[in-house]
Amino acid sequence: NAGVTQTPKFQVLKTGQSMTLQCAQDMNHNSMYWYRQDPGMGLRLIYYSASEGTTDKGEVPNGYNVSRLNKREFSLRLESAAPSQTSVYFCASSEPGWDIQYFGAGTRLSVL
Amino acid sequence: EDQVTQSPEALRLQEGESSSLNCSYTVSGLRGLFWYRQDPGKGPEFLFTLYSAGEEKEKERLKATLTKKESFLHITAPKPEDSATYLCAVQVGGGYNKLIFGAGTRLAVHP
């Protein structure tokens, strides 16, 4: 079992460029999440999807969009990257009724 | 405002030197408290969930405890492989599985 797989692992963008971060899980979980992790701060929720076909904003959604492509895949898009979006991005998944969230290895993004 | 604070920010121990990490929280409607371990360059890995004051969970050299205002992660006779960042998160009431994370404690265990 791969668990939660994120691609790419590293990315460097110039200000204004766009990109999509990919996430896939093979645990048949209904719920999926996108977080960002910055030095000295806890993980902060960007968007989540409680189930296939639904998405909702988290704590820091500005500048991001998401797509729940199917039950397995949940992507995060930066339409016009800004230096403030330099961060490590984590995708997670969980099953309703089971509170544990399982995380991917992260995407390290630098916006110059 | 819901808040989770972890202390210390960083901790250096000698192998075999026991200690505790603290996670204090101010939240409304606590549903559960989670401990995760994060190794450099990797995602958080689940360790424990605690749901009620007085509850304790153990795994190898780690023991987590919970009170109404804080949780402790006790590390007994640590080994260098216990070196990692330990994250605390609280689950609050609401329509989804919302977790509020602390900033973590970086633990370094030296031989």
Image: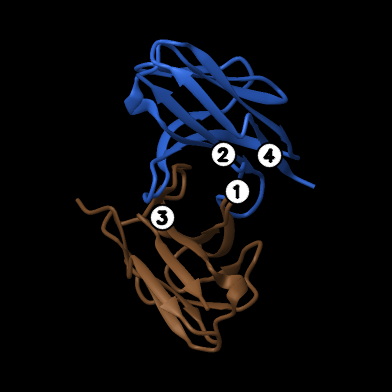
Chain colours: A brown, B blue
- Amino acid type shown at disc 3: Ser
What SS does tag 1 mark? loop
Res A105 visible? yes
User: Residues under labels 3 and 2: Cα distance?
Assistant: 21 Å
Q: Residue furthest left?
A: A1
Residue A50 image position (x, y, % from top left): 50, 61
Residue B55 image position (x, y, % from top left): 55, 17
- Residue B104 marker: 2
Residue A15 relative to residue B93: left or right: left
Name the residue at 46% across, 37% down: B36
- Residue B78 marker: none
> Which chain does tag 2 point to?
B
User: Residues under labels 3 and 1: Cα distance?
Assistant: 18 Å
Name the residue at 48% across, 11% down: B18
User: Residues under labels 4 and 2: Cα distance?
Assistant: 10 Å
Q: Residues within 10 Å of mark 1 (few under 14, many from 20)?
A: many
User: Residues under labels 4 and 1: Cα distance?
Assistant: 9 Å
User: Residues under labels 4 and 3: Cα distance?
Assistant: 22 Å
Mark closer to the chain start, 4 or 2: 4
Q: Which residue is mark 4?
A: B4
Mark closer to the chain start, 3 or 1: 1
What SS does tag 4 mark? strand
Residue A10 image position (x, y, % from top left): 36, 68
User: Residues under labels 1 and 2: Cα distance?
Assistant: 7 Å
- Amino acid type shown at disc 1: Gly
Residues at badges 1 and 2 in contact (C-beta under 8 Å)? Answer: yes
**Of the two numbered discs 4 and 2 in the rendering, the one whose residue sits closer to the viewer:** 2
> Which chain does tag 1 point to?
A
Residues at badges 4 and 1 in contact (C-beta under 8 Å)? Answer: yes
Q: Which residue is mark 3?
A: A93
- Residue A42 marker: 1
